[in-house]
Amino acid sequence: MVLRLLFVLLIALNIAVGAWLLLGQNETHARFATDPGVPKLRLLSELPPPVTTAAQAASVALPATTAAPATSTGANAMANAPANANAVLSYACMALGPFATQEDLRIARNALSGQVQRMRARQEQITQPRGWWVHLPPSPNHAAALAQARQLGARNIQDYFVVSAGDNQNTVSLGLFKDPANARKRRDEITAAGFQVQMTERIETVPEYWLDLIPTDSKHFDWRSRVRDPGIGSHSTGCF
């Protein structure tokens, strides 16, 4: 009988402890969900509604208002940009020359390399006079040319020879002269002796060398301080 009573009491005690654990733990954990001094988490639905006042609207409108002058300034800067770019990129292309030899061209190119954006060398072929040639008209054959030469000797005219090859074959040459005045004097002497004399200007094709360049600063480009050859000139040319 006593044992049954103790068994019933133990069962009742277990039931009471279990009920306390189930019903009392929620309240205890809810009361101490965070450490002291730490704010509790709140749902969005528990927060007060946002304040929309005229001051807030003004604060939003202020950046838009202040942005307008900046946009206008940016537009002005863009409008002025092409003009400024053209001022910076303005340059003049020029050609220096003619140089007599490739070595002269190379020296000038090295002297100017630090003051130009681009350079290029080019060669041109030009014709120039080499002097004057006094001669008799060409004969139809070599024998006729020799006969003319003997006639010159018979009149005490010296310094002549018969051209036996080339474009002027069978022509009696009377001399080559750089000074046209000396050529005319020789022509007049032979003409006075009774011969038909011709005076022909000699032309030759020679190369000349040019240096095309684009200065870094066209307004302050002084190429003469570096290229001191008085025979060299300059002129504007097409850009490359």
Image: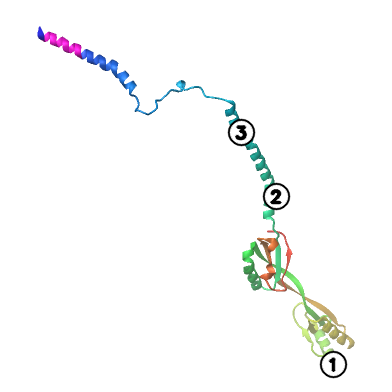
Question: Circle 3 sits in a helix, a strand or a loop, which is it?
Answer: helix
Magenta segment: 3-13
Looking at the picture, which amino acid does disc 1 mark? Ala
Give whichever of discs 1 and 2 has the lower sequence position. Answer: 2
Give the class, few, some or many, for how many residues have Cα within 10 Å of label 2's Cα (few <14, many ≥20): few
Q: Point out the frontmost of discs 2 and 3.
A: 3
Q: Residue beneath label 2, please? A: 83
Q: Residue beneath label 3, please? A: 62
Quarter of the image with the C terminus in it:
bottom right
* Residue 202 percent across, percent down from the top left: 78, 77
In the drawing, does residue 137 fall left or right of residue 27?
right
* Residue 104 percent across, percent down from the top left: 66, 73
Question: Circle 1 sits in a helix, a strand or a loop, which is it?
Answer: helix
In the displayed image of the protein, which residue is found farthest to the top? 1
Quarter of the image with the N terminus in it:
top left
- Given residues 59 and 23, the one toward you in this image is 59
Residue at left 85%, top 80%? Answer: 198
Give whichever of discs 2 and 3 has the lower sequence position. Answer: 3
